[in-house]
Amino acid sequence: MADIRKWEPFRELSTIQREMDDFFRRVFGSLTPSGLFRKEFRGEWYPAIDCYMKNNNFVIHADIPGVDPKDVDISVAGNVLTIRGTRKADLEEKREGYLFHETSFGGFERSLTLPEGVDASKVHATYRNGVIELVMPAKAEALPKKIKIELEEGRKAA
């Protein structure tokens, strides 16, 4: 059953404003006065996430290249799944020869609401080639059901 909620435009505007503030802080917050070639992205970054249904399972792929899986924490609270972790910077590297440095590092956190009917108690996580894959079975009642349309007697289909 779908949740019906009262539309609150000011809450939506607040969410949009927060997302735009985050965007500008990530993109422009670390520009140095010396120009483009000294542009460094530091601090927050967010792994890209893909979600889909496959073979009656809900699947999530989170791209975390350069992150040690030991530095990732995955948790579920209610129907919200959270992936958080840290991409560590190589502070020992020499800066000589760099024109610019775009690799982001630091902490990240992504949360998403799981679809109704996903059994998060049976989540299975694997890591391969910089991608974490989470697989959760969908409960039988959550799977799509085909509904047959019956014609009433005496009426012809149009």
Image: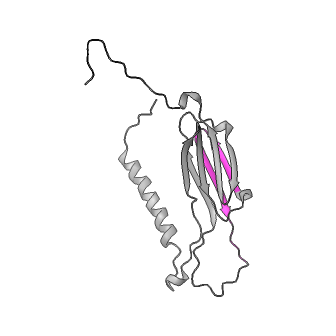
Residue plotted at (71% across, 80% down): 93
Q: Whole-percent x and y of residue 92?
A: 73, 78
Q: Is residue 93 above or below residue 78?
A: below
In the image, residue 46 lies in the stretch drawn in magenta:
no
Residue plotted at (26% across, 16% down): 155
Q: Whole-percent x and y of residue 56?
A: 58, 36
Q: Whole-percent x and y of residue 17?
A: 42, 58
Give the farthest residue toward the top. 153
Hey, which quadrant is residue 98 in on the image? bottom right
Residue plotted at (49% across, 84% down): 35
Hey, which quadrant is residue 40 in on the image? bottom right
Residue numbers of the magenta segment: 72-91
Q: Whole-percent x and y of residue 121?
A: 67, 36
* Depth check, front residue: 43 or 129: 129
In the image, residue 87 lies in the stretch drawn in magenta:
yes
Q: Is residue 97 above or below residue 117?
A: below
Hey, which quadrant is residue 52 in on the image? top right
